[in-house]
Image (spheres, rainbow, N blue to C red):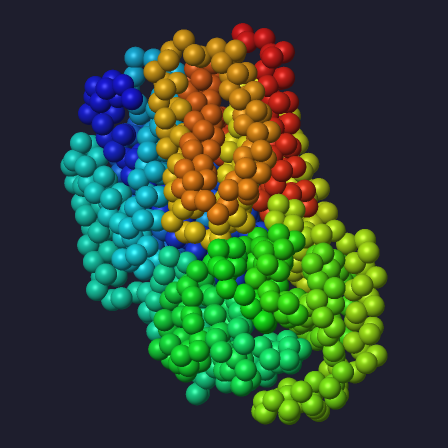
């Protein structure tokens, strides 16, 4: 970056303020996202909604930034806006936790429309101001060439994103809670407001950020707000403990003599739930004559290990849980992990299956419905192929799936049929235990659901149960009920697609079922959004259109790369943080290089960058294929994925300075239009691709689609005649 940006004191103040805004923006986005996911027990669709609202509102704010040209005392406004940016994130967390049980019925599953509207209103103030400040700051810069101002602000904001992302992902997440981590960007922005206030007139203006610091931050730091606000969410329950790990927050509460364990707002399990534990274990365990080695993926703290160890032949239970904090608190508050035969393993279950050389007689997946891309990885053809290699001859695999007590039809039938068709690729025998949660039992040897035979096997092995007994079997395993359930699923399985890592159809069906429960008419909703978007795109000139499609590609391909990484390596929090940070590093480098190359502001350069995005998008599936083959090596995880993100970020970042000089209409109008186009494009990419197209089309097809969209904008630039 040229030293020209520091030629005046005002430029220096803008540099400091926008960098602080970038730090605040990324940290606020990460922390508020975690809070909203905890509140809404969210999947990737919720993530897409929150991110889309964030980008859309920030884009609207940048468009409103043209109003800043009317400000007579801009530094006074900058102080006020910076104080607002400092304090509002703390208010976000207080509002999310305080209003959850006020606005929504306690225990209610929040619907799609409620998520869209509530997150829109919650994010509205902060995002509008953050976007406004981007355009406002561009008007404050004093440069020899005004056309370079929007590109400069883009670089400064990106540098702040890099600093904030690294600080949060690699430092603060280990030493501070969600709420207290926001003190850092708050203090930084208030300090910047003090510095700007000292340079502004009147001098008493500096008292505003100082008063905010004394009146808000100091008291909140002395009152331990995290436990107090967590108690708001869990009103009626005694808060026993709250801790945070890199995977989220874990809360333990007590109601009477029962302990309840929550992770990111979702109830994981509660103690004394013997019926659920017995059902999850015994239907699978009795199918094997003498199970010695058992693999349990998730659920061990709930008490399933106790049920497994009732079988005298069991020598070891390998219990795999992603979050070590769940294991640690489970040991502290329950006795389910005390037996020396239980070996807790804190890692991603998919990664463990791929890397271990142990073999197992029974495998129990105690997992929820695959309504997230993360969980769907345990229901795919690729995973079952890996799992089959870890199974002994005649091993039994138990996979849960959302079911129905009586009638199974529509999307729910398709969801179960896809799982059945996928399991059938590797296992000859498949039995289905019906219920609100179906249990799919898979093996190479014959399986039985005869109630008398199962009861006899339990008795012969001396296994005592309270609920899953002969009376329970006679109702649940009624032959007519079992046969009807199997017949419906098996018939639908003939036309059901196989669930794959890069084509997650089970995830798609699970999302559709979730939406159907809340009676969301996505067709009408999508039609309205599509019509508004079509009008917006049709009004864009060629250069803003190119920025729109590049923003679309940036968000879409970033989601694609992160999900591909999850599929191949598991939820590695550190590495995903590196991937996102590397994208921002690439964007900063690309924008900086193009800011220096004044002659690069040509239509040919813009077309070349658009075509480079097309080539990158179309080459990405080839990279995924190579990464899949080398998944056991750390080379692709530690080097390949970060390098790919630097390249993507470089292409995206390089376009902005070129566009700001090629399509210059004054500092404020240019900055407002280009920031708005970039952010709205990213909004569409995050929402449409991440939440809709990926489950339907798969990763590889989405990459080609993104390339096609950018090819269209390159063609528009080619026929454009600049004035």
Specify the quadrant of the image occupied by residue 223.
Answer: bottom left
Q: Is residue 693 above or below residue 115?
A: above
Query: Which percent across, then down, holds residue 108?
Result: 57, 69
Q: Report the number of discs.
A: 0
588 vs 558, left or right, is left
Name the foreground residue: 162 vs 716: 162
Q: Is residue 90 above or below residue 166?
A: below
Residue 116 shows in the view: no
108 vs 337, left or right, is right
Name the foreground residue: 42 vs 84: 42
Residue at 49% x, 78% y: name it.
315
Specify the quadrant of the image occupied by residue 473.
Answer: bottom right
Residue at 55% x, 43% y: name it.
628
Residue at 45% x, 29% y: name it.
647
Residue 574 shows in the view: yes
Image quadrant occupied by the N terminus: top left
Residue at 42% x, 81% y: name it.
339
């Amino acid at each position: 970056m040229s030293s020209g940006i520091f030629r005046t004191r005002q430029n220096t103040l803008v540099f400091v303020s926008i960098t602080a805004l970038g730090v605040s923006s990324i940290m606020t986005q990460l922390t508020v996202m975690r809070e909203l996911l905890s509140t809404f027990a969210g999947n990737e669709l919720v993530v897409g909604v929150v991110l889309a609202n964030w980008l859309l509102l920030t884009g609207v704010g940048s468009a409103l930034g043209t109003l800043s040209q009317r400000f007579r005392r801009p530094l006074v406004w900058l102080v006020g806006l910076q104080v607002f940016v400092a304090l509002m994130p703390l208010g976000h967390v207080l509002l999310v936790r305080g209003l959850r049980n006020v606005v929504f019925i306690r225990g209610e599953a929040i619907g799609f429309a409620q998520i869209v509207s509530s997150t829109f209103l919650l994010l509205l103030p902060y995002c509008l101001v953050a976007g406004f400040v981007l355009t406002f700051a561009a008007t404050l810069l004093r440069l020899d060439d005004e056309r370079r101002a929007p590109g400069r602000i883009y670089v400064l904001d990106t540098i702040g994103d890099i600093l904030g992302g690294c600080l949060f992902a690699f430092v603060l997440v280990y030493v501070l809670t969600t709420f207290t981590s926001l003190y850092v960007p708050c203090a930084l922005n208030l300090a910047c407001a003090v510095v700007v206030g000292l340079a502004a007139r009147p001098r008493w203006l500096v008292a505003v950020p100082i008063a905010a610091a004394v009146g808000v931050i100091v008291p909140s730091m002395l009152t331990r707000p995290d436990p107090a606000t967590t108690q708001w969410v869990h009103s009626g329950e005694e808060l026993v403990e709250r801790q945070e790990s890199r995977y989220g927050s874990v809360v333990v509460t007590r109601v009477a003599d029962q302990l309840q364990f929550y992770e990111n707002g979702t109830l994981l399990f509660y103690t004394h739930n013997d019926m659920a534990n017995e059902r999850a274990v015994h239907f699978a365990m009795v199918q094997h004559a003498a199970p010695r080695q058992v693999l349990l993926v998730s659920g061990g703290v709930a008490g399933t290990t106790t049920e497994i160890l009732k079988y005298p032949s069991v020598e070891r239970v390998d219990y795999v849980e992603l979050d070590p904090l769940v294991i640690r608190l489970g040991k502290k508050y329950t006795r389910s992990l005390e037996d020396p035969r239980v070996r807790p393993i804190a890692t991603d279950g998919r990664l463990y299956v791929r890397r271990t050389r142990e073999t197992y007689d029974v495998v129990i997946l105690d997992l929820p419905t695959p309504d997230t891309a993360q969980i769907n990885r345990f229901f795919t053809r690729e995973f079952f192929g890996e799992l089959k290699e870890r199974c002994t001859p005649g091993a039994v695999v138990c996979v849960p799936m959302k079911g129905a007590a009586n009638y199974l039809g529509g999307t729910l039938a398709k969801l179960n049929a896809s799982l059945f068709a996928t399991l059938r690729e590797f296992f000859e025998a498949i039995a289905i235990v019906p219920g609100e949660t179906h249990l799919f039992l898979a093996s190479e040897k014959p399986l039985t659901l005869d109630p008398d035979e199962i009861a006899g096997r339990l008795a012969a092995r001396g296994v005592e149960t309270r609920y899953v007994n002969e009376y329970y079997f006679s109702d649940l395993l009624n032959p007519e009920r079992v046969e009807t359930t199997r017949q419906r699923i098996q018939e639908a399985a003939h036309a059901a697609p196989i669930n794959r890592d890069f084509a997650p159809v089970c995830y798609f069906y699970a999302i559709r079922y979730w939406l159907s429960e809340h009676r969301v008419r996505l067709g009408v909703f999508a039609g309205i959004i599509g019509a508004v978007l079509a009008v917006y795109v049709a009004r864009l000139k060629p250069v803003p259109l190119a920025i729109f499609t590049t923003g679309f590609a940036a968000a879409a391909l970033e989601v694609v790369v992160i999900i591909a990484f999850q599929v191949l390596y598991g939820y590695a929090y550190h590495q995903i943080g590196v991937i996102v940070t590397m994208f921002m590093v690439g964007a900063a480098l690309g924008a900086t290089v193009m800011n220096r190359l004044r002659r690069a502001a040509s239509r040919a350069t813009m077309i070349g960058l658009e075509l480079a995005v097309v080539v990158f998008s179309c080459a990405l599936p080839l990279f995924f294929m190579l990464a899949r083959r080398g998944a056991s090596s750390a080379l692709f995880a530690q080097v390949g994925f970060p390098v790919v993100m630097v390249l993507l970020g470089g292409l995206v970042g390089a376009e902005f300075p070129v566009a700001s000089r090629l399509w210059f209409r004054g500092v404020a109008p240019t900055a407002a239009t280009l920031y708005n186009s970039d952010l709205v494009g990213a909004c569409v990419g995050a929402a449409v691709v991440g939440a809709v197209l990926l489950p339907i089309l798969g990763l590889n097809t989405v990459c080609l689609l993104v390339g096609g969209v950018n090819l269209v904008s390159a063609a528009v630039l080619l026929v454009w005649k600049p004035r």
